[in-house]
Amino acid sequence: MANQHTLQRPVCVEGVGMHTGKRCRVTVKPAEENAGIVFHLAGECIPALAEYVVSTDRCTTLGRDGVRVMTVEHLLSALVGTGIDNAHIEVEGEEIPVLDGSAMPWVERLLDAGLCEQRAPRQRVQLVRPVSVMAGDRGIWAMPHPERLLIATVHYSHPLVGTQVAWFALDKIDYREEIAPARTFGFWEEVESLLARGRALGGSLDNALVIFPDRYSASLRFPDEVLRHKVLDLLGDLALVGVQVEALFVAVKPSHTLNTAFAMALRQTILGEVEQ
């Protein structure tokens, strides 16, 4: 899609927040050209840009002037995955509904509403120098490349997961079939500590894939569903750059903290090049 796109009509979704456990309601509405993606709640407008990230504790939270919206990554991933550049997102509550733990319910509702092509060209830039963010044995790198490619890997010291590696041509990928169905996941050993920290209060076997010592809580949708959900999250967090970037991306053990720091570094690099 060479031009920007928005929705033909609004999409309204209600559900429970993964971490707050509270009911929330989201309405995704069409937006004008070059508006980008903007969250609206409690009288505040919060652009979906890296500088508005205020927390990455098990999810990506955006905020402004004390107003916050949690767990934006799945919806953002669905928007970029379906090719929607401009949207106003009205939020009633503190969090985006988790639904089934994947981006698939969002994708289905967005596509049912239909996309509307706009006249303005999609904002896309060519990376001219490498950008990287590293933390211990984790890291994300971007290198100049004529195509948008992603190589991703995860590693967990668990016999059912281990090391998973895959690569994706981001301009050719069938997001709906290859990425959107992958569910959020967690290890059984983490549950008690998460609840003690006030996290995952809305989690259940209906909206998360739980990894027990010897089994998964449900049949896998992909053999490498753990990796694909990490890619789903990464694409949502990279939406916070605000533009598409032509580059080869390599992500080793990505996380929301790493993803959003990388999005900020990439955004600063791009803005710096524009200013020059």
Image (cartoon, grey):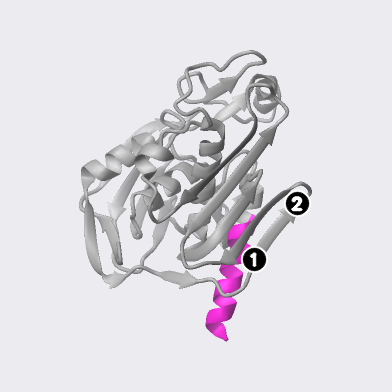
Q: 162 or 183: nearer the eye?
A: 162
Badge 1 density bin: few <14, some 14–19, many ≥20, Cα 10 Å: some
Tell me which corner region of the image, top left, top right, bottom left or bottom right, holds residue 248.
Answer: bottom right
Residue that badge 1 annotates? 131
Looking at this view, name the residue that lies furthest to the right.
Answer: 136
Residue 19 visible at all: no
> What is the number of callouts on the image?
2
| As drawn, 140 above or below 200 | below
Kind of element beneath mark 1: strand
Q: Residue at x 69, y 52 (%)?
A: 139
What is the x, y in percent for residue 167?
A: 52, 47
**Is residue 136 on the magenta stretch?**
no
Magenta-drawn segment? 261-276
Kind of element beneath mark 2: strand
Would residue 153 appear left or right of 34 to someone viewing this image? right
Badge 2 density bin: few <14, some 14–19, many ≥20, Cα 10 Å: few
Q: Which residue type carries mark 2? A: Ala
Quadrant for the C terminus, please: bottom right
Q: 250 or 79: nearer the eye?
A: 250
Q: Which residue type carries mark 1? A: Val
Quadrant for the N terminus, please: bottom left
**Is residue 274 on the magenta stretch?**
yes
What is the x, y in percent for residue 181?
A: 41, 33
| As drawn, 75 above or below 171 | above
Q: 257 or 125: nearer the eye?
A: 125
Residue that badge 2 annotates? 135
| As drawn, 24 above or below 142 | above
Q: Residue at x 46, y 63 (%)?
A: 147
Residue 101 visible at all: yes
State how far apart marks 1 and 2 are (Cα). 14 Å
* Magenta residues, dominant SS class: helix
